[in-house]
Amino acid sequence: QDNKLQAIIAHAKEYGFIFPSSEIYDGLSAVYDYGPWGSELKKNIKDYWWKSMTQLHENIVGIDAAIFMHPTTWKASGHVDNFSDPMIDNKDSKKRYRVDHLIEAHADKLAMEGKKEEEYALLKNMEQLLAKDDYVALKQLIEDNNIVDPVSGTCNWTDIRQFNLMFSTQLGSVTEEADTIYLRPETAQGIFVNFLNVQKSARMKIPFGIAQIGKAFRNEIVARQFIFRMREFEQMEMQYFVRPGSEGDWYQYWKEARLQWHLSLGIPASEYRYHDHTKLAHYAKEACDIEYNFPMGFREVEGIHSRSNFDLSQHQQYSGKKMTYFDTELNQHYVPYVIETSIGLDRMFLLILSNSYEEETLIKDDGSNDSRVVMRIPPVLAPIKLAILPLTKKDGLPDVARSIMNMCKPHFRCFYEEKDTIGKRYRRQDAIGTPFCITIDHQTKEDNTVTIRYRDTMQQERINIADIKAKVFALIGA
Ligand code: ATP
């Protein structure tokens, strides 16, 4: 399974999906850049989420808040005091680890050695001790299991301490006057502080939601597993404001609706599961994760949280500004309750890569074996929808292909290519997940038909040039 992740990382780099950041300087740990096809795929995931949240829900509107916020925001939200993780240092190597990551890495090793019961017991023990914040017992657990520093192989551990994950910087040029501000560790607070601005300006009535896509930053101590855990990443979050007392029903609604969103992409339900939280923040009423079966096992891709009126009440208290809503039906003022759905865009991207990547063995006409790497990306998300390929560079075929390109490119992302054999060109499109290829051949000049080739089945059929646009639209389901 680790091999599959390695293969995906290599493929993502070779085919222009993801590059390590500042690679010529040997990269920056847990920071990545999206390449030509990666940036298209990422944008398509955003659009798919944005459309389903805002366009298809008449009572959800979007915002785009700044990354920098007034520092008191993070006091009110609890991040200054509580957004920390238990850490442990190795005195020999001076390496620092998040305790849960260190233990999980060991659990993964046990699983790979087939020691399923030991893995389970270790994770269960860890969860219980984390829930109690029992750091003495957690350190004991690490020592009893002979968990070593994965880098140095030694284990001269310090005590476990808390370490805040927020990045800070200075606003203003003169050091004495400068205010310490934070790079937001989640996008949600930009929504909470704008709650009344949005409600009033867009004339929203409860229940209603505010959606946002944007960067978030966390100084993750052990950032690992490619883009699963990054220091700079993007979140797609939606806060849904409801009447007190109705939050249980809305929580169930969003828990179900968000899983349906994933399944609407054609990803098998067997690859997903819910993980209901047992350890809840003191303000939270209910919380669950949607987990996906990544190459390294089932891991969280999205969280759904019933957050009571905690955030708005906190901002009301810290800012001294009213955060209440007047419900005309009930003739009552109240601080609304909130259901939050929060998905990592980069994690969703890794999910799509993991679900799409396939090394397929093919049997050639002469009976010998061939192979291809095919990215079975859902057509609606594919970076390129249609490749337009003249069979040869001669006989006026490129001219016909060019006119098809001009006809289609205003409507969806197309790619024109005339170099190399048609077989090689098909393989390259398979490797970046292009669902359809159009080939222009000599028959095209006689009857205005082309072949359309399907990525997943490699089947081909002839269609009229005039039908290409409607056909591709129908197939991408956009
Ligand atoms: P985890 O336990 O994996 O660190 P979390 O519970 O801290 O995640 P939330 O604070 O609920 O995550 O954030 C919501 C979503 O944001 C997560 O489900 C995940 O998809 C994404 N996310 C969180 N941290 C990161 C990160 N460091 N890199 C990439 N995505 C992240």
Image (cartoon, rainbow, N blue to C red):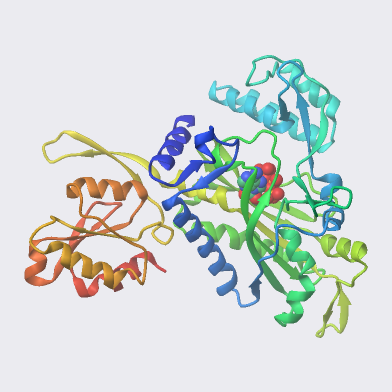
Q: Total label count?
A: 0
Instruction: Tell me if residue 166 can be seen.
Output: yes
Q: In this view, does 376 lie to the left or right of 183?
A: left
In which image quadrant can residue 137 be found?
top right
Residue 432 pos. (x, y %): 36, 49
Q: Residue at x 49, y 30 (%)?
A: 2
Q: In which quarter of the image is the C terminus?
A: bottom left
Q: Which residue is drawn at 70% across and 62% down?
A: 66
Instruction: Tell me if residue 264 can be seen.
Output: no
Does 104 appear above or below 449? above
Q: Nearer the viewer, residue 30 or 160?
A: 30
Q: In this view, does 295 lie to the left or right of 428?
A: right
Residue 182 pos. (x, y %): 77, 51
Residue 287 pos. (x, y %): 73, 53
Q: Which residue is drawn at 90% across and 71% down?
A: 321
Does 413 appear above or below 207? above
Residue 154 pos. (x, y %): 69, 14
Does 37 appear above or below 119? below
Q: In this view, does 84 lie to the left or right of 469?
A: right
The residue most toward the front is 174
Q: In this view, does 358 lie to the left or right of 227?
A: left
In which image quadrant can residue 384 be found?
bottom left
